[in-house]
Structures are given as structure tokens and as C-alpha cells.
Image: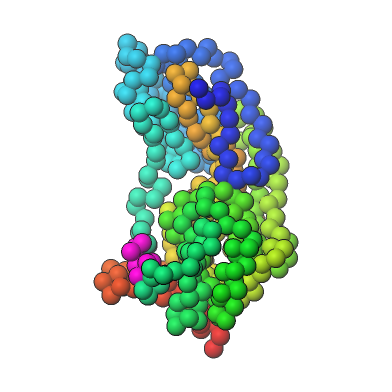
Amino acid sequence: MLMKKHFVFLSMLLLAVSCSDPTNDITLVNSPEGNFESLWKTIDQQYCYLGQKGINWDSVHTAYLPRVQELESKDPASRELFDLMAEILNLLNDGHVNLYSDFDVSRAIGWYENYPENFNNSLIYSERYLGQDYKRAGGLYYEKIGEEKVGYIRYDSFASSFSSANLWHVFDYFKECEGVIIDVRNNGGGNLNYANSLASAFFTQQTTVGYIQHKTGPGHNDFSEPEARIISPHKSCQWQRPVVVLINRQSYSATNEFACSMQYAPLATLMGGISGGGGGIPLSYELPNGWVVRFSAVPMYDAEMNPIEDGIAPDIEVELTDSAIAQGEDNIIEEAIRHITNQQK
């Protein structure tokens, strides 16, 4: 059995989230209505984006309670109740919001489904780019492209580790290159430590790249004062030539935070489409029937205190075209190559 309350960490950051029991003033009855009330109040008091998103959570309760009550004769862990509660959670349109049961996991897709994909994995492993004989250092796949003038790094998950030694060897391999491309399209996130470590290689001085807040009470806008997030230069690896970061709508969570940080790197350019967001560090809570609801609890912002939940816009917007794909080219990568090499003219 999962613990009553536990953190799902995206990183090893020491984030002290103050969370009171969101259901401490209602009876935790293991019935369809009891589970609904537990889920509703958990989101009401602990989800960090109700105010920002302008969601009338009281009206959600009013609309869905009669439908839940129609299931009162059902098993409190029935599929019908799960589907209904998943429908409620999906109103938040948040990729960090899920309901976990033994038979299914709810997931929102609205935050990315109406955006261009801007990524074709088969192109990445063609001979024009990584090929089949690419190099690998930890979770970093890399090769020289663009007539060996540009270094290309494909990093598909911030859950995949890399070390300082890995990064040093990658940069050493690219030492004759005019710049590097870091492709984090379709990278759904992972560990913020890796996001911060990779970003730090492109900073030459301590830089505030964003802020973080903590929930301090049950109100939708009860938050602590913002706490600065600072990137310090990497101690052993520095890249001080142009870098282009490729993002798309499925660059999510820790990847979104990496894109946020790289906005402030002096020689960095973001290219592609808007990232997916996921600016809230999640918390999990167990309902009376044993299901677990995960939700965004700790909001993050950029250095100007703009919320990053809805994504980071690229400096240069480029959409992957069907005509380029037909020719075996990723025109987003091609534009990144041109952007780097043109800076040397």
C-alpha cells in the first residue's frame, strides 16, 4: 500500500513543500461519494494552478456530484467511478495530473494534441544526422553534422543520466565545431538535476533563471514569497560558442524547465515550437479506495515571474514540413545548422 502522502520528485532539489492533510475535515469514507469528495478537496486545497487557470472548482463539484451519486451502489473502486473521476481531473488539462488504479492510469492529452508534432524520430537516425554509428555518453547521443561543422546532441529523456565526464568528452569531440545543437524534442522530462547540470555548461556566471513558490494554505492563491532559482557555471565543462536548443510541444516538465533556463544562457537560441509546459512539481495523495491522485503542487516561473506552466516560446519558430520529410531532411535541424554557421560569417 502506498503511503498516505508522498512526493513524486522530478529532481533531487530540496524543496520543502508544506502540505496539510487536504481531507482532514471530511470523513474518509470508502464509497463512490467519499472518494469523489476526497479527490475534489485535495485538488481544491493543494493544486497550484486553479487560480492561474481561472477554473471554477466549486462549479465542478456541483456538476459532477449528482453523477457520482448515481454510482453509489457500485463498487467504490469501479471502472465507472474511475472514468468519471478521470474526466474531472482532465478538466485541469495538466500533464502532471493523473489518477492511478490497478487497472488504468488517467492522463490528459489536450495540452499537446492540437499542436504540430515537429518531430520525426526516423529522420534523427538517418545518415544525415545521428546515423546508426552515433556516439553515446550516458543518456546523450551525439555526432557531428552539417559537414562536421556542428555538433548534434540528442537527449530524449532527462530520466537518463549523464556525468560531468560524459559531458566533457562530448564537448571535446565537438571542439572543432562552430556550435552545438541540443535536441530535446519529445523529451517528456525526468530529473531536474540533469536539466540544471546540462544548462550550467552554457553559463559563465551565476544567473537567476526563475522562481519557485510553495503552497502555504488551502486558498487557491495561498503561496509563499518567490524563491529564486539560480544556475551556476559548470565546474568542469563549459561551452562558449553558439548553442541551439530544439523544442516542441512534447518537451515537457524538466525539459520545459531546461528550456526556461536556456533562455538566459548568453549564446543560446531556442528553436522549433512552443514547449509543453508542466511547470508544477507534483505531489501524490492516496484516496480511501487505494487509488492515487497526482497533481501539480509547486508552481515554477521564469526570471520575470511569468508562469511556465503553459510552455516556453522559441526564439525562432520553425515547423517541420512534409516536403522536408519526403526529402529525408529535418528542416528544423537544417535551420539550426544555418543559424550556427551564419554566425561565423
Question: Residue 45's quadrant in the figure?
Answer: top right
Question: Residue 11's quadrant in the figure?
Answer: top right
Magenta region? 120-126
Residue at 56% of width from left, 75% of height from top? 174
Percent of width and height locating residue 42: 53, 26
Percent of width and height locating residue 190: 52, 48
Residue at 36% of width from left, 26% of height from top? 82
Percent of width and height locating residue 109: 37, 44
Q: How is the image coloured?
A: rainbow
Look at the image and tell me in which quarter the C terminus lies: bottom right
Residue at 58% of width from left, 40% of height from top? 9
Camera-side residue of 124 and 38: 124
Percent of width and height locating residue 205: 73, 65
Looking at the image, residue 123 sits to the left or right of residue 281; the answer is left
Please check the rendered image and state whether residue 122 is part of the magenta-colored stretch, yes or no.
Answer: yes
Q: Residue furthest bottom?
A: 345
Looking at the image, residue 70 sits to the left or right of residue 143; the answer is left
Whether residue 85 is visible: no
Q: Residue furthest front?
A: 133
Position above or below: 116 against 323: above
